[in-house]
Image (cartoon, rainbow, N blue to C red):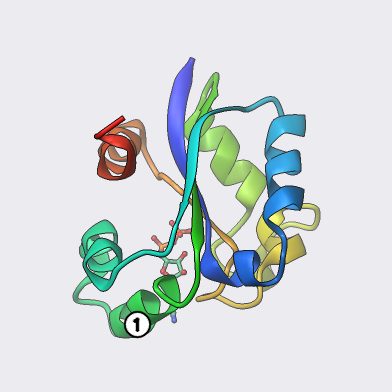
Amino acid sequence: MNNTLALIKPDAMQKGFKDKIRKDIMENGFVIVEEKTLNLSIEQAEGFYAIHKDKPFFGELVEFMTSNETHIMKLEKENAVVEWRDLMGATNPAEAESGTIRAKYGTDISMNATHGSDSNENAEIEINFFFKDL
Ligand code: GDP
């Protein structure tokens, strides 16, 4: 079994998609091991997305990620990182395969409903970022 970090981002929370996305996650064989809802501080959003700090969209990304609550989940499944990214679909909802979460619930390349770790190594770092005190 492997773990990954999943976020339901502020756009999807604002639109009331949290329960639908959690249902999709569980119906696809993931176990939600730990979860909590937070309104990210600027420091948390900047820290979480530090890898993107030199990108032109960084300011917009931090503003978006602090605009409303985020639901944070540690997921477990065999091959969890790849399986969750497959279920989310492409970063840009307009390019995401139909039936994927970003195709169903995303708005645009910034407000794309969910986050998923991109490697086992980053999954461990990102899970520790939000759940290290548990
Ligand atoms: P992910 O791993 O699929 O989430 O994609 P990335 O790591 O490339 O980007 C991280 C997040 O930054 C994305 O999920 C989007 O919310 C945001 N993002 C990515 N590209 C753009 C962009 O070109 N413009 C804006 N405004 N946001 C972007």
Quadrant in the picture for the C terminus: top left
Which residue has dot 1 on it? 57
Number of on-image labels: 1
Could you tell me residue 26's position as x and y percent?
71, 32
Ligand 1 visible in quadrant = bottom left
Could you tell me residue 9's position as x and y percent?
53, 62
Secondary structure found at label 1: loop
Q: Name the residue: 77% across, 32% down.
A: 27
The answer to whether the beta carbon of the residue marked 1 is less than 8 Å from any atom of ligand 1 is yes
Judged from this view, the residue extending furthest toward the top is: 1
Q: Name the residue: 30% across, 40% down.
A: 122
**Residue closer to the observer: 40 or 3:** 40
- Residue 117 in the image: above or below residue 108: above
Q: Which amino acid does label 1 sit on?
A: Phe
Left or right of residue 30: residue 104: right
Q: In which quarter of the image is residue 120?
A: top left
Q: Name the residue: 80% across, 53% down.
A: 99
- Residue 55 in the image: above or below residue 106: below
- Residue 91 in the image: above or below residue 27: below
Could you tell me residue 60's position as x and y percent?
37, 84
Q: Name the residue: 44% across, 27% down.
A: 3
Residue 73 visible in the snapshot? no
**Residue closer to the observer: 43 or 102:** 43
Could you tell me residue 84's position as x and y percent?
57, 39
